[in-house]
């Protein structure tokens, strides 16, 4: 899948070294308006593709379904990129609000995976979810934690091997619940692991992948707003693991 046009537009707007605050504000405002305007047509395309995949207009051949699923995956990815950019804009302007309530983490994870199924299918990847000694009911902002999960699972998919299994585990710890997303893949973390969560930090260029460098940064902001922490590490068996915590109510 190719996302070079959107990526290049993003880079041209934000990789400027100019420090003029007014110019930076204008770029932020322009991109926020642009991505906001893109949301509606992207959603419309996704809805139309869903109707096609559900045989609303008649049965599809195997080849037709394959092509439509490819288009769906691209649209889903664009939707995630636009949401990340808008979330960043809200963060920069103090408009990101966290509204915690009692939610079922199991349902949140299931809904996230359902929305990403066409993206995972591009590399024939599957997800394995495990709950360890914990009640799936926690206190968090469902929309924002879903955004964290989306970015981490996308990251695991992008750098994971074909036909790999993305492991998601939920485990109760002292005063918090830890969610871990891991996969065996190509992403090698350097010594400065924490820099992955910096704004605009991305390994996409090194691995010839599209990326804005906002996904993990937004994860950090949202997790921090929940009172939790997020971290990354490589394991000896070739797995890259990202984990974050949700503080108990």
Image (cartoon, rainbow, N blue to C red):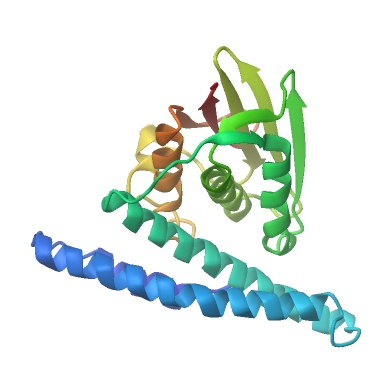
Image position of 121 (left or right of 237): right
Residue 167's place in the image compared with 150, above or below, is above
Q: Name the residue rendered at 57%, 35% in the picture.
A: 101
Q: Where is residue 225 in the image (x, y as percent from the top left)?
A: 40, 35
> What is the residue that sits farthest to the left in this orientation?
20
Q: Name the residue rendered at 71%, 60% in the picture.
A: 123
Quarter of the rendering occupied by the C terminus: top right
Q: Name the residue rendered at 69%, 43% in the picture.
A: 109
Quarter of the rendering occupied by the N terminus: bottom right
Image position of 167 (left or right of 13): right
Q: Name the residue rendered at 42%, 47% in the picture.
A: 218
Q: Where is residue 2 in the image (x, y as percent from the top left)?
A: 54, 74
Image position of 34 (left or right of 103): left
- Of 50 and 204, which appears nearest the observer? 50
- Of 32 and 171, which appears nearest the observer? 32
Q: Where is residue 127 in the image (x, y as percent from the top left)?
A: 75, 45
Q: Is residue 210 visible to us here?
A: no
Q: Where is residue 209 in the image (x, y as percent from the top left)?
A: 50, 62
Q: Is residue 145 visible to us here?
A: yes
Residue 242's place in the image compared with 69, above or below, is above
> What is the residue that sits farthest to the top in this orientation?
174
Q: Where, by quadrant of the figure, is residue 142 drawn?
A: top right
Q: Where, by quadrant of the figure, is residue 76 drawn?
A: bottom right
Image position of 178 (left or right of 15): right
Q: How many labels does the image show?
A: 0
């Amino acid at each position: 899948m190719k996302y070079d046009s959107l990526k290049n537009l993003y880079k041209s707007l934000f990789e400027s070294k100019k420090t003029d605050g007014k110019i930076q504000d204008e770029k932020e405002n322009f991109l926020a308006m642009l991505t906001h305007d893109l949301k509606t047509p992207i959603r419309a395309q996704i809805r139309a593709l869903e109707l096609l995949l559900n045989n609303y207009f008649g049965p599809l051949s195997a080849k037709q379904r394959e092509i439509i699923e490819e288009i769906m995956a691209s649209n889903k990815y664009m939707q995630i990129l636009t949401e990340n950019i808008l979330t960043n804009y809200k963060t920069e302007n103090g408009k990101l609000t966290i509204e915690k309530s009692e939610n079922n983490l199991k349902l949140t994870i299931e809904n996230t995976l359902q929305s990403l199924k066409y993206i995972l299918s591009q590399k024939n990847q599957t997800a394995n979810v495990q709950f360890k000694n914990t009640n799936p009911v926690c206190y968090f902002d469902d929309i924002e934690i879903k955004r964290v999960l989306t970015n981490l699972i996308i990251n695991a998919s992008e750098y994971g091997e074909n036909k790999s299994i993305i492991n998601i585990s939920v485990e109760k710890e002292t005063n918090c619940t830890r969610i871990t997303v891991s996969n065996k893949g190509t992403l090698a973390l350097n010594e400065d692991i924490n820099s992955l969560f910096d704004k605009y930090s991305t390994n996409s260029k090194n691995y010839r992948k599209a990326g804005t460098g906002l996904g993990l940064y937004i994860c950090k902001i949202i997790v921090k707003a929940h009172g939790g922490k997020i971290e990354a590490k490589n394991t000896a068996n070739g797995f890259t693991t990202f984990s974050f915590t949700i503080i108990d109510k």
